[in-house]
Amino acid sequence: MLLTAVLALLVLIGLGLPVAAALAILGLLLAVIYSSAPLHLALPDIVWGNSTEFLLVAIPMFVFMGEILLRAGVARRMYESLTRWIGWLPGGLMHSNIGACALFAATSGSSVATAATVGTVAVPEIEKRGYNERLFLGTLTSGGTLGILIPPSINLIIFGLLTNTSVSALYLAGFLPGLLLAGIFSLTVIALCVLRPSWGGQPVRYSWRDRLDSLAGLLPPLLIFLVVVGSIYAGLATPTEAAALGVVISLLLATATRQLNVEMLRQAVEGTMRTTAMVMLIIVAAMFLNFVLGIIGLTQTLTTFIADLGWTPLQTLAAIIVFYLVLGCFLETLSMLITTTPLIAPIVVALGYDPVWFGIVLMVLLEMALLTPPIGINLYVVQSVRGAGRLKDVVYGTMPFLATMLVMVVVLIAWPEIALWLPGQFD
């Protein structure tokens, strides 16, 4: 049954079908083959039930907020401010890339939007300051992945919905690992630039007066982060309500910078509708597939099979990690999250692991999928922003950071309290 499902999914995706269509067709095929009941009759209820889920309203809100901030010029001012504060480190503006990605991730919730936005601002600096192009591009692809780990993350919302896990707890759990991963990225850059000083480009130097003057560029993303995430942590708002607050603040910021106009709003709304439609179609199709998998007994059968192997929890977890690393070469991140979580999460919880902790480990594994060819979306996003050269340059520059992320997974396994300490303070 599992082999049929996997092969059918690979064939459907290989045919070039949209992911949502592939998932829906797979659900219908499995229902016809393995169930005598007319499972397709449940599709309308599943579509309606999930498309009216209050928690999912946060997705278009966060997307809309990111679209407004992008067009209001917040990212450029933020990047210039970070350059003045951390550009003196070995590697120069590459640390600004990582820092800007971390800050923008804390406002947009999207890895692709983060990589595209910061990349647009940063790429012109490569030739201007003589950086090693591959490593510079690698900081953009890897830094962009922080968008699905640092709250407010759209992927954490979906994981919470699929596993009935508190989104507030997931947001708390993602904060410290996200900052730690950003720091490890910067340490990777420092180590490489110390070994190869020519890779670090021309040093940038600013006076303390310049740095203090630039602080205004950091205030908008910090303000939004405090309003959105702070309201959730303080118990003043649900994730959906906090997302709506974020939209209001982003509109006020766009007004203050005189960037708010009818055309800007039209573009932001259009981009939001396009992204939201894609995400919701995938979610609804995946929910139907998950319903079918539960009815035909595949979820329970797989859990029993894993238990009967007699492996230790750590051995099973290692096998799951390898599974995600391989799958990440062939599937897009959102598809991986939605299709595998209902199967894998029950196994991990049955092994005794905390679902909140696993949600964070899974986000790091999904981040790696954003960077692994041939499907790694962030590779293509940065290459598109770059607009010239070969894709393999982006791939080569990303490899050191893939290794760094694998180290991060090991660190989370060895010290799970990195993810669980902060949620524990709010119990």
Image (cartoon, helix red, strand yellow):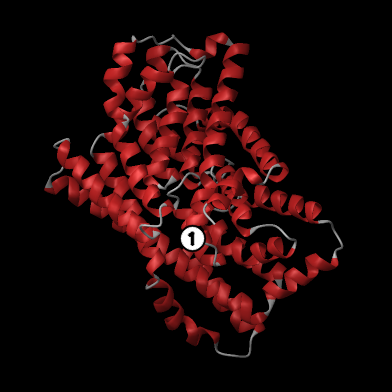
Relative height, residue 56 to residue 149 (above, below): below
Q: Which residue is drawn at 27% across and 51% down?
A: 247
Query: In which quadrant will I find the N terminus?
Result: bottom right
Is residue 271 at all visible to an observer of this figure? Answer: no
Give residue 418's quadrant in the image: top right
> 262 or 241: nearer the eye?
241
Furthest toward the bottom, the residue is 37
Image quadrant occupied by the C terminus: bottom right
| Numbered-mark total | 1
Task: Name the residue at the right extreme.
Answer: 310
Q: Would you name the residue on which mark 1 appears?
A: 158
Return the x and y of residue 228 as percentages of the image width and height. Answer: 35, 49
| Place of residue 8 in the rendered image (x, y in percent of width and height, measured from the top left) | 62, 67
User: Which residue does the image show at 59% across and 45% down from the upper left?
Assistant: 364
Q: In this view, does 41 lie above or below 413?
A: below
Residue toward you, 105 or 137: 105
Task: Name the residue: 28% across, 35% down.
Answer: 74
Percent coordinates x, y for residue 66 in the rendering:
32, 46
Q: In this view, does 418 lie to the left or right of 143?
A: right
Q: Give the residue type at disc 1.
A: Ile
Q: Is residue 379 left or right of residue 36?
A: left
Q: What element carries label 1?
A: helix
Residue 96 seen from this side: yes
Where is residue 391? Give x, y as percent: 51, 33
Q: In the displayed structure, does residue 417 sit left or right of residue 201?
A: right
Q: Residues within 10 Å of mark 1 (few under 14, many from 20)?
A: many
Q: Along the line of sight, which residue is nearer the eye, 395 or 219?
A: 219
Q: Quadrant location of residue 180? A: top right
